[in-house]
Image (spheres, helix red, strand yellow):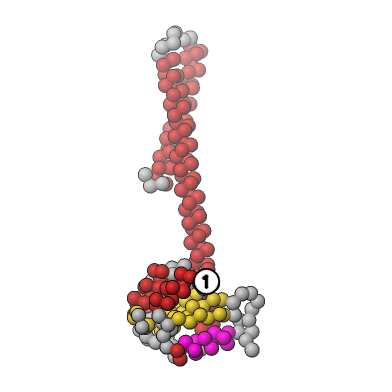
Amino acid sequence: MSETVPGRSREILLVEDNPGDARLIREYLAEAKYSAFHCTWVQTLAEALEAVSTSRCDILLLDLTLPDSRGFRTFAEMRSRASQLPIIVLTGLDNEDLAIKTLHEGAQDYLVKGRVDPDLLERVVRYAIERHKIQRELEEARDAAEAANRAKSAFLANMSHELKTPLTAILGSCELLLYDVAGPLNDGQKNALDAIQKSGQHLLSLISDLLDLAKVEVGK
């Protein structure tokens, strides 16, 4: 009897056109000691694409040589349609270049039939699911951080603009008063307006720097 950890079984989609290989892989999964797996078997790429669009599954075990697709094209098509799922290539093609290519393009692992036993298959499937989960969580955290950074930059740009507009009006009015547009001023009034103007210019310079930084961060 298999030892399984508590919790729901992992849904596996097995894409394999050879009934004998499919039966052996399903037997291996049934012998899992630490995980519970439920395996759905399809024999063509078309059936697999239909299954991932209509059914929930946690991972794909994908043969590359199918009646309607062969080689890397099989992986590429499945990857493009099921990018949200981890994919383990499980094939009879013992080709190192092909293995590296599929791993580079996002496969979780590349297993060659005949070199797989129940313990290895269970371990690879479990680790692939966990790695993919961690990867998705990291991507979501990165996306959230980028969104927060964009919101911060937009806020800084808007805030700087809203502060700059009234401050420019204040400085303009101050300059007009210094030119005696509203009538002559005494020395005390001029000194006060001069202090307001200098402080305002300094504040305007800080706001302009902040606005420039915000524009750089949003790529403008």
Quadrant in which the N terminus appears: bottom right
Foreground pick, 83 / 179:
83
Q: Position of residue 108 (x, y in %)?
A: 45, 75
Image point 65% across, 76% down: which residue?
6
Q: Position of residue 130 (x, y in %)?
A: 54, 72
User: Does residue 62 lie above or below 207 as drawn?
Assistant: below
User: Does residue 197 lie above or below 160 as drawn?
Assistant: above
Left or right of 70 on screen, residue 52:
right
**Residue at the spot of label 1:** 56
Amino acid found under the numbered disc labelled 1: Arg
User: Does residue 208 lie above or below 89 as drawn?
Assistant: above
Magenta residue check for 25: yes
Q: How many marks?
A: 1
Magenta residue check for 76: no
The part of the image, by quadrant, that contains residue 47 is bottom left
User: Does residue 128 lie above or below 196 as drawn?
Assistant: below
Image point 46% across, 74% down: which residue?
51
Tag 1, which secondary structure? loop
The part of the image, by quadrant, that contains residue 96 is bottom left
Start and end of the magenta stretch?
22-32
